[in-house]
Amino acid sequence: MSPYTAPLVPSPISTDLPPTLTFLSNPIASYFNAAPPYNNVTLGALLFTLPPRTPRLLLLQRAGGTDPNAFSDFWQIPSGSPRPSDPTMLHALARIIFEQTGLRLASVVTMSGTEIEPASRETGHAQRMRMLFMVEVAELGLLQLDNSPFEKDLLYGSQGLDINSVPVALNLGKHRQHVWSSEEDLKEFINSGLYPIEERAQYRMMLEAFGLHNQNLAYLLSLNQRSQTASSSHGFPI
């Protein structure tokens, strides 16, 4: 098997940010020069399906391995850390999403949660800030009802694809498969007792994001329509 080669990463389709998120456009060096935990950040992306389908959240299953600290087989949202080569935190988020899913960041809707992980004496890990963002990606598009007489299912955009046909391209060195999780699926993860406390806390943050998603439906739809127009007229900037 040939080694994994990271593809060229598109820039964010829109660099317009809500007033509360303008810090994402700061030069990336400002984060690395900041005091802990702001110089040690993990970014997480919450990718939801849009109406009229019931909201589902994209989860990725970590690839198996022998490292007990790697949380093998656990389900997570696309997440990762910025690099010095990323121009801004917004570009870092776009890179993380694209490298882990092949999907292109269209816009950032809101920050949906933060968590500070304390430093660990056992492992020597430094204090870390985890930030979760609700985002829109170009490939999802608007979901609409099937107009056929049988009303078989909901369609994806104008291409007539169901949600499982969204072209999620995993880096198999990191993740083995993906699923579009319902709110009930997340509740089962939380209540299963199969995951360590720190993982269950993140699932609860994801669960809270379902409520936040429902509060932002009108804004999500307007962003999606705008990104569709921009991507079809100008293509995706690289």
Image (spheres, grey):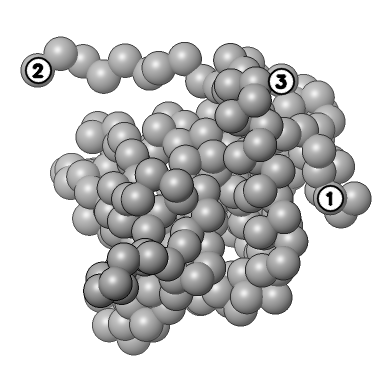
Please name whichever residue, 219 or 230, is drawn nearer the observer in this view of the structure.
230
Q: Amino acid at mark 1?
A: Pro
Label 1 residue SS: loop
Label 3 residue SS: loop
Residue 203, percent from left and from top: 46, 71
Mark 1 neighbour density, 10 Å: few (under 14) some (14–19) many (20 or more): few
Q: CA distance from mark 1 to mark 3?
A: 19 Å
Farthest residue toward the front?
A: 149
Q: For residue 187, say whether it is visible.
A: yes
Q: In the rendered image, which residue does mark 2 sit on?
A: 1
**Res 87 label:** 3
Residue 85, percent from left and from top: 63, 16
Farthest residue toward the bottom?
A: 191
Q: In the rendered image of this protein, does residue 133 appear above or below residue 126?
A: below
Q: In the rendered image, which residue does mark 1 sit on?
A: 18
Of badges 2 and 1, the one in the foreground is 1
Q: For residue 70, say whether it is visible.
A: no
Please name whichever residue, 158 or 71, is drawn nearer the observer in this view of the structure.
158
Q: Is residue 173 left or right of residue 233?
A: left
Q: CA distance from mark 2 to mark 1?
A: 43 Å
Farthest residue toward the left?
A: 1
